[in-house]
């Protein structure tokens, strides 16, 4: 039996190689070591490394409910805070009119109407925090 030091996936191991008389392949038993340098390993060697503990995976994030995107649907282009709501349900607006002020990263961004129409629903209020894609206003 021969001893070798090998590195597998960046982890050093001390291995003992046993040659089997009936087959030309080798079976290798590996034990972790504190420090090791890579050593040549036969291409016919089989390395049996200790199993790593399974890494816990983060639970998949639930998909966020989003409004159907339409010409009169206004969503948050970025996360931030609503500093001012300039419209109310029933107000008539023209394309480009300011609907609300969204503060993001210490900058105030005016969110404007994409189309002319009547405000059907205002889904946010002053002081509210919103995320990218959250529904803000519906215009019909």
Image (cartoon, rainbow, N blue to C red):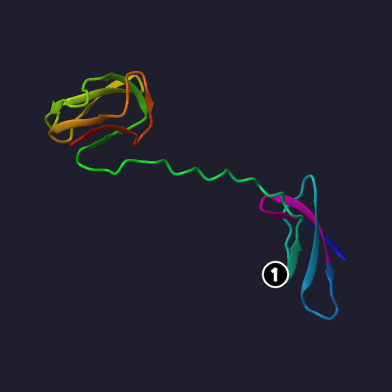
Residue extending farthest bottom: 22
Tell me the residue at 78%/71% (across/down): 26
Q: Is residue 117 above or below residue 32?
A: above
Magenta stretch in the rendered image: 6-17
Residue 31 place in picture, x, y as percent: 81, 54
Residue 25 vs residue 112, the one in the foreground: 112
Above or below, 126 relative to 15: above
Q: Quadrant of the C terminus?
A: top left
Left/right placement of residue 107 relative to residue 117 reads: right
104 vs 66: above or below:
above
Secondary structure type for disc 1? loop
Q: Residue at x 19, y 41 (%)?
A: 71
Q: Is residue 75 left or right of residue 49?
A: left
Residue 8 covered by magenta stretch: yes
Image coordinates of residue 64 in percent, x first then y, are 42, 41
- Against 59, residue 116 (above or below) is above
Rendered residue at 38%/32% (across/down): 131
Give the percent coordinates (x, y) of residue 58: 58, 43
Apparent side of residue 76 relative to residue 117 in the rendered image (left or right) = right
The image quadrant that residue 91 belongs to is: top left
Please name whichever residue, 45 or 130, is drawn nearer the observer in this view of the structure. Answer: 130
Q: Is residue 140 left or right of residue 75?
A: left
Residue that mark 1 sits on: 43
Picture coordinates of residue 83, whole percent (x, y):
31, 18
Q: Name the magenta segment's main secondary structure.
A: strand
Which quarter shows the N terminus? bottom right
Query: Which quadrant of the structure image shows residue 77?
Result: top left
Q: Residues within 10 Å of mark 1 (few under 14, many from 20)?
A: few
Q: Residue at x 78, y 78 (%)?
A: 24
């Amino acid at each position: 039996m021969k001893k070798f030091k090998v590195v597998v996936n960046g982890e050093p191991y001390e291995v003992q190689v046993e040659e089997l008389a009936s087959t030309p392949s080798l079976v290798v038993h590996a034990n972790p070591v504190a420090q090791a340098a890579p050593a040549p390993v036969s291409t016919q060697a089989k390395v049996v490394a200790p199993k790593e503990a399974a890494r816990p995976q983060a639970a998949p994030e639930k998909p966020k409910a989003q409004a159907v995107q339409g010409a009169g649907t206004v969503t948050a282009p970025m996360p931030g805070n609503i500093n001012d709501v300039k419209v109310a349900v029933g107000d008539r607006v023209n394309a480009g009119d300011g609907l609300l002020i969204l503060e993001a990263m210490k900058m105030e961004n005016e969110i404007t109407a994409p189309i002319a129409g009547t405000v059907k629903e205002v889904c946010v209020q002053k002081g509210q925090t919103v995320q990218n894609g959250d529904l803000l206003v519906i215009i019909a």
